[in-house]
Image: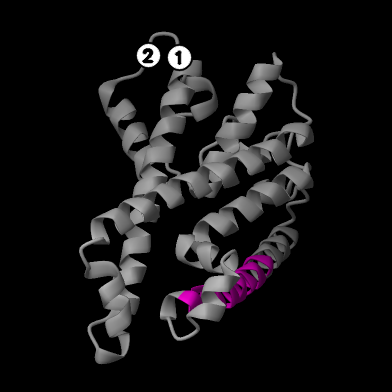
Amino acid sequence: AEGGMNFTDAFFMSTSSTCVTGLGVVDTATAFSYKGHVVILILIKLGGLNIIAFGFLFVLLSKLGLGVKHDSLIEDFVNQDSINTTRSTFKKIVLWSIFIELVGAALLYPLWNADFATTGDQVFSSVFHSVSAFNNAGLSLFTDGLYHADIQTNYLVHLVITVLVFVGALGFAAIFDLFDIMCCHQHSDRPLCLQAADIVPDTVAGLGVESNCWLVQQQDFRIVDKRAGNLEPPFHARR
């Protein structure tokens, strides 16, 4: 942005983008120039890959264990080819994440009903929001995020972003299982092939519980507002 920002704010935004926390001390849409948005996009991508990679490694370590039952699994990951296997896995994670983000961007592109200055801005916005959603970064190029006047009722955009957030939250252990049915048939005894069966239902159930709690909370807010004589709906319920 014109005039720049102080080092503390810049450092906070950089850390927030890398750690994909979704926190910000400035308005991402207006406080940064195009180059700043590109830097934030790169930081989100690098931070997301780091978290995804370490999360995948944690799943491997937690599932493999050290028992006799999983000796065959341990051999697969600690033999002389383990370094190459790790590199291959990380490469697979990078390629899959880029593919999913590009699909998300392609879906978002025709759905925007916001006014963009150029086609390039619309393409960049699609890519940025796809990467931000898939990596659960929570940052947006719109002031007020998805509550921005141009997209607050664009539920198709909301749906695409929700799906990207959901898929990104599953983790690649589950994603690989979902699209690698042959592995599950050939190695049905391997715990890694059971990730999707465990994670997906639990995640959906958790989302269902949280959604119901949110709806109850909104209803309570409306009741309180009515009793207080406030005819204007709460901020989160305004249209």
- What kind of element bears circle 2? loop
- What kind of element bears circle 1? loop
**Residue 234, visible in the rendered structure:** no
Q: Is residue 74 magenta?
A: no
As drawn, the label of residue 1 is 1
1 lies above or below 223: above
**Residue 141, visible in the rendered structure:** yes
Q: Is residue 65 found left or right of 38 in the rendered image?
A: left
Q: Is residue 198 magenta?
A: yes
Three-letter amino acid code of the residue under disc 1:
Ala
**CB contact under 8 Å: marks 1 and 2:** yes
Three-letter amino acid code of the residue under disc 2:
Gly
Residue 27 x, y percent position in the rendering: 49, 29
Q: Residues within 10 Å of mark 2 (few under 14, many from 20)?
A: few
Q: Which residues are magenta?
A: 193-215
Q: Which residue sits at x=36%, y=54%? A: 53
Q: State the residue lying farthest toward the bottom.
A: 68
Q: Which residue sits at x=75%, y=21%? A: 115
Residue 127 vs residue 149, the one in the foreground: 127
As drawn, the label of residue 4 is 2
Residue 177 vs residue 145, the one in the foreground: 177
Residue 179 x, y percent position in the rendering: 59, 64
Residue 156 x, y percent position in the rendering: 77, 46
> Where's the C terminus, which quadrant?
top right
The majority secondary structure of the magenta stretch comes to helix
